[in-house]
Amino acid sequence: MQRRRVDVVVIGAGPAGSMAAAELAKRGLKVLLVDKRSQVGVPVRCAEGVGKVGLMRYFAIRPQWISAETDTVRLYAPNGDYLQLNQGMQGLILNRRVFDADLAKWAAEAGAQLCLQTYACGLLMDRGWVRGAQLQGPKGRLSVRAKLIIAADGVESRVARWAGVDTTLALKDVESCAQYLMGGLELDPPRCEFYFGRQVAPGGYAWIFPKGLSRANVGVGISGNYAGRRTAKEYLDDFVARVVPGGEKMGFVTGGVPVSRVLKKVYGPGLLIVGDAARQSNPLSGGGIIPALEAGRLAARVAVQALAEDDLSERSLCRYQKAWNQSLGQSYARHYRLKEAVTRLPDKTLNATARTLRATEPHRLTLFQIFMTALRNRPSLILDIRHLFRSREPD
Ligand SMILES: Cc1cc2nc3c(=O)[nH]c(=O)nc-3n(C[C@H](O)[C@H](O)[C@H](O)COP(=O)(O)OP(=O)(O)OC[C@H]3O[C@@H](n4cnc5c(N)ncnc54)[C@H](O)[C@@H]3O)c2cc1C
């Protein structure tokens, strides 16, 4: 078995891992970025939607990252009525194959060593401390000692669990998703469409995100709590047959999206957990690209300081959890509570909300207004929300 020593091993070259690796390598640290895949970002398990303003906080956006751009969103009620929002808030549909590859390349150019086809199969532990990782690469087994491990291994994360962190997700806190890449569609003008209702996507929603004027990601995310025995693919096939029957199916993926609270602890001695692995996606929308970038950046900042102080203890690394809470964590805690209330709304409330707001001009309509109208249509929701807000400790 080969042996090596580095400052940091980052496990997973998704947005969270590549961001962390790039930021660390830029500071001159010796970083190993490993991913089990042979090509970064492939297969793409994502609808690829992201806010332009959010992304611009991290990068100058490159044209080759973008499949489509739109400022129009349609929300469909179960009865087919829809609300259109058009507030000049640009949404991008990325080409994640290119985007993820560029991020990993950026990390490599900053000095991180990128190892593909390299599977993390265990941790080197010493009296509760994470001291390194065991890797299985194309040339065999590798044992790497590191001062810090960053677990960026996505929703199915095992790394944090190996370190003793409880990463269990409740059934209601994970969306089971299925998605086709479809062609032969008419999407002029392109817009992002969301479809709600117990028949369409119980506990979640269906989406059509354009990837040009004729191609789109068409998917469904459902909550196991509400869906009974039917799978996400069965819901998706029904949806496709009803809404885009003429489209050509060009690809199919499934995947899970955490819509939970963030892990109670996103650090341990010698360990930081980032992105989907830490359950840091937005629990209301399921969007995880921006929070993964944010988590990767925050983790790297804390790691740089901790490594400079030569203190990788929990007392030192807990600064990452605080930084996360101050950044997106507190608002995502509120989003989680809203999600809990919103997923319980019956179809008739959604229909009534769409009916009430139908006449509002798209550029005046806001998500807040929609939510307040839903409250008026279902006053008991106020009690639900009060209960949810009261039953938890303050943020
Ligand atoms: C169907 C679907 C649609 C989605 N749509 C959107 C959307 O429109 N917008 C949005 O913002 N988010 C969306 N998401 C969520 C988004 O894809 C994730 O939140 C985001 O990719 C999280 O980034 P990450 O870096 O944490 O993890 P990932 O991108 O999952 O990266 C984790 C990496 O770790 C690697 N890995 C895992 N285990 C190991 C191991 N043991 N050893 C080595 N490597 C390992 C994997 O190969 C992978 O490359 C969607 C998710 C799904 C499933």
Image: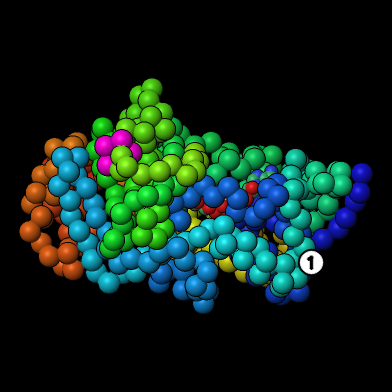
Q: Is residue 242 magenta?
A: yes
Amino acid type, callout 1: Lys
Query: Quick one: 133 or 147, which is closer to the camera?
Result: 133
Look at the image and tell me in which quarter the C terminus lies.
bottom left
Q: Which span of residues is magenta-colored?
A: 239-243
Q: Residue at left 34%, top 29%?
A: 227
Q: Residue at left 20%, top 58%?
A: 84
Q: Which residue is mark 1?
A: 30
Q: Residue at left 51%, top 66%?
A: 65
Disc 1 CB within 8 Å of nearest ligand 1 atom: no
* Label 1 SS: loop
Classify residue 196 by image quadrant. Answer: top left
Classify residue 305 by image quadrant. Answer: bottom right
Q: Position of residue 276 (x, y in %)?
A: 53, 49
Q: Position of residue 235 (x, y in %)?
A: 35, 32
- In the picture as drawn, the residue positioned furthest to the top comes out as 229
Look at the image and tell me in which quarter the N terminus lies.
top right
Image side of residue 322 versus residue 39, left or right: left
Query: How busy is the neighbourhood of tag 1: few (under 14 within 10 Å), some, or many (20 plus)?
Result: some
Q: Is residue 6 magenta?
A: no
Q: Position of residue 337 (x, y in %)?
A: 33, 47
Q: Is residue 277 visible?
A: no
Relative to 180, residue 327 above or below: below
Q: Is residue 14 visible?
A: yes
Q: What secondary structure is the stretch in magenta mostly built from?
A: helix
Q: Residue at left 60%, top 50%?
A: 42
Query: Quick one: 325 or 9, which is closer to the camera?
Result: 9
- In the picture as drawn, the residue positioned furthest to the bottom comes out as 60
